[in-house]
Amino acid sequence: MPIRQQVQVWHGGQVERWHALILSSDSVSGVPFVRPADCDSCRLAVGRAEVDSIRVGQPVLGFWKTAAVVLIGPIMFVEVVCAIEGHFPSCWPTPD
């Protein structure tokens, strides 16, 4: 796994957001995501038996996907309504 890959480690009803994850036979350790990945003094560990689940994510990609839906969704809605009402190909004003 890439060192900057964000993971959520769920244990005991709480979640830790880490990167620089290391899985061993008896523990899971990582660096809090807001700290530098090479910060060994920041590294936290949880016993594997205590871990409920691990979720891998990419928050930046998720942000851009959400932004695209929020920005493009309404435009597509207007285009569909215009097409249904017979203003095809577009309702948007054209420059003169």
Image (spheres, helix red, strand yellow):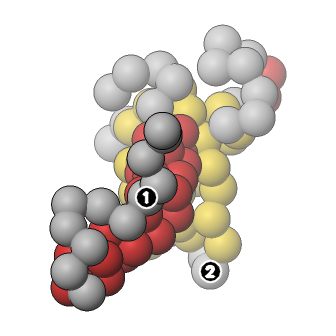
Residue 14 numbered tag: none
Of the pair 74 and 29, the residue shown nearer to us: 74
Q: Residue 11, image x and y in percent?
A: 56, 69
Residue, x 39% and y 21% (percent of image)?
2
- Residue type indicated by callout 1: Trp
Q: Residue 91, image x and y in percent?
A: 37, 66
Label 1 CA crowd tier, 10 Å (few <14, some 14–19, many 20+): few
Where disc 2 sits, the SS reads loop
Single out the residue that lies furthest toward the front.
96
CA gap, disc 1 and disc 2: 50 Å
Residue, x 39% and y 73% (percent of image)?
78
Taking the image as drawn, is residue 80 in sight? no
Which mark sits nearer the N-terminus, 1 or 2?
Answer: 2
Of the pair 27 and 11, the residue shown nearer to us: 11
Residue 13 numbered tag: 2
The answer to whether residue 30 is left or right of residue 82 is right
Taking the image as drawn, is residue 4 in sight? yes
- In this rendering, the label closer to the viewer, 1 or 2: 1
Quadrant that contains the N terminus: top left
Where is mark 1, residue-wise? 92
Quarter of the figure with residue 23: top left
Label 2 CA crowd tier, 10 Å (few <14, some 14–19, many 20+): few
Residue, x 60% and y 41% (percent of image)?
18
The answer to whether residue 81 is left or right of residue 12 is left
Residue, x 43% and y 47% (percent of image)?
94
- Residue type indicated by callout 2: Gly
Q: Residue 84, image x and y in percent?
A: 20, 85
